Image (cartoon, rainbow, N blue to C red):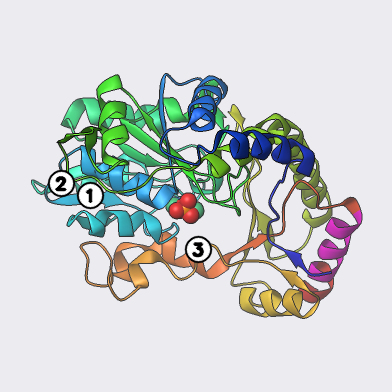
């Protein structure tokens, strides 16, 4: 059996079928149906936020989060993320400006962002990479100082807390992804968390064509609605999130115990005062290691273990971004180095003890 980098945390089929049965009976399949409303409420409670709007996927969520702010000019962001982060900026006819990441958190920082602010800067879009919280207080201070709105790509950060506070309480808007590869899934899906009721109202309008009522359309909206089958998947799996988080934490600790002393390899550090979600298990294979990162990646593959080089290449290396401000490799030395060293090992709720031990054994043999 191949081992992929992740595996969806599916609820027991009966739980899902029970809700599907009710949906079939009601014949309400989408358009803010009862399960959509119920999931919005449950997630808002679970994530301790007042205003949350479900969307069909996080990419459209990011697109809309920028759209509601009615921006012109540049958005400062990270090159070290999934390409959807920057695509959401281009789709809004805005220009991404890339700044380098911190070598420890792998996130962009208030300091690097501040140095890149120009009179063209319209907003800041940091990413909580691998669920590691950005310096949210520093960014909050920067927003107060500059007035620049803050949109977090929180696609990796479901259920993460920093200093006891839900990470999606920060920023004007935060966007979560519920894609099948993420730790909590609605198959495809996402949520936009809004600071104010006005922002939620705007997102709700924009995700439904800008329709107010049968005869009134007030925005150039789009279709970014989550449907009832997605909401059902989300409702059925929500009760199993904490258990899955715990199982991931156990596998994470096991990896750390068995990889600790391999020369040239170091896992991403553990951060103080963070309630992590253990979404990923990234390790750095240093350029001094006896075997290169890409060689290890191939060896694992030949053993049926599919690790992933998240994030290689950098977004700034893709052709549509290569000429964007800040995209040159000289401007992004840390991101460039990390991108060449990083490897995400398999981590999911059902990854068992023996599998972790086997993966660690192969890595040890390859690197020694
Ligand atoms: C997965 C992901 C997205 C896109 O999420 P979808 O729900 O698949 O559209 C955006 N940003 C980051 C950082 C991601 O990892």
Q: Is residue 368 left or right of residue 17?
A: right
Q: Is residue 362 magenta?
A: yes
Q: Identify which residue is drawn at 83% across, 57% down.
A: 356
Label ID, residue 311 = 3
- Disc 1 and disc 2: Cα gap in Å? 6 Å
Q: Identify which residue is drawn at 49% across, 48% down.
A: 129
Q: Is residue 273 magenta?
A: no
Task: Residue under label 1, please give it.
Answer: 75
Give the crowd class for mark 2: few <14, some 14-19, many >=20 residues within 10 Å. some
Residue 341, image x, y percentages: 57, 67
Which residues lie in the magenta part? 354-363
Give the crowd class for mark 1: few <14, some 14-19, many >=20 residues within 10 Å. many
Residue 267, image x, y percentages: 67, 53
Labels 2 and 3 touching (C-beta < 8 A) = no
- Disc 2 and disc 3: Cα gap in Å? 25 Å
Q: Is residue 151 left or right of residue 183?
A: left
């Amino acid at each position: 059996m191949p081992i992929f980098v992740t595996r969806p945390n599916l609820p027991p089929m009966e739980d899902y079928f029970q809700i599907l049965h009710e949906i079939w009976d009601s014949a309400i399949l989408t358009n803010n149906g009862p399960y959509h409303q119920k999931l919005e409420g449950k997630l808002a409670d679970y994530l301790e936020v007042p205003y949350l709007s479900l969307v069909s996927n996080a990419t459209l969520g990011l697109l809309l989060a920028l759209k509601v702010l009615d921006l012109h000019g540049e958005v400062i962001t990270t090159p070290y993320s999934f390409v959807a982060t920057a695509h959401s900026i281009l789709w809004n006819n805005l220009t991404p400006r890339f700044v380098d990441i911190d070598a420890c958190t792998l996130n962009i920082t208030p300091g690097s962002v501040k140095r890149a602010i120009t009179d063209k800067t319209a907003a800041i879009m940091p990413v909580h990479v691998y669920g590691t919280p950005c310096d949210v207080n520093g960014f909050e201070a920067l927003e107060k100082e500059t007035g620049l709105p803050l949109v977090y790509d929180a696609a990796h950060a479901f259920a993460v807390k920093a200093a006891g506070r839900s990470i999606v309480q920060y920023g004007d808007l935060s966007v979560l992804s519920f894609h099948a590869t993420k730790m909590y899934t609605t198959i495809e899906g996402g949520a936009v968390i809004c600071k104010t009721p006005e922002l939620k109202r705007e997102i709700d309008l924009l995700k439904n064509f800008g329709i107010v009522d049968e005869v009134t359309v007030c925005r150039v909206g789009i279709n970014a609605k989550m449907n009832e089958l997605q909401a059902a998947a989300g409702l059925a799996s929500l009760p199993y999130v904490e258990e899955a988080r715990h199982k991931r934490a156990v596998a994470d600790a096991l990896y750390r115990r068995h990889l600790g002393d391999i020369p040239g390899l170091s896992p991403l550090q553990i951060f103080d005062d963070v309630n992590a979600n253990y979404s990923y298990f990234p390790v750095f294979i240093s350029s001094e290691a006896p075997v290169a990162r890409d060689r290890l990646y191939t060896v694992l593959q030949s053993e049926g273990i599919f690790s992933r080089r998240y994030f290689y290449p950098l977004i700034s290396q893709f052709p549509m971004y290569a000429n964007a401000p800040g995209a040159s490799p000289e401007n992004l030395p840390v991101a460039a180095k990390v991108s060449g060293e990083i490897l995400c090992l398999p981590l999911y709720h059902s990854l068992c003890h023996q599998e972790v031990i086997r993966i660690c054994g192969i890595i040890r043999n390859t690197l020694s």
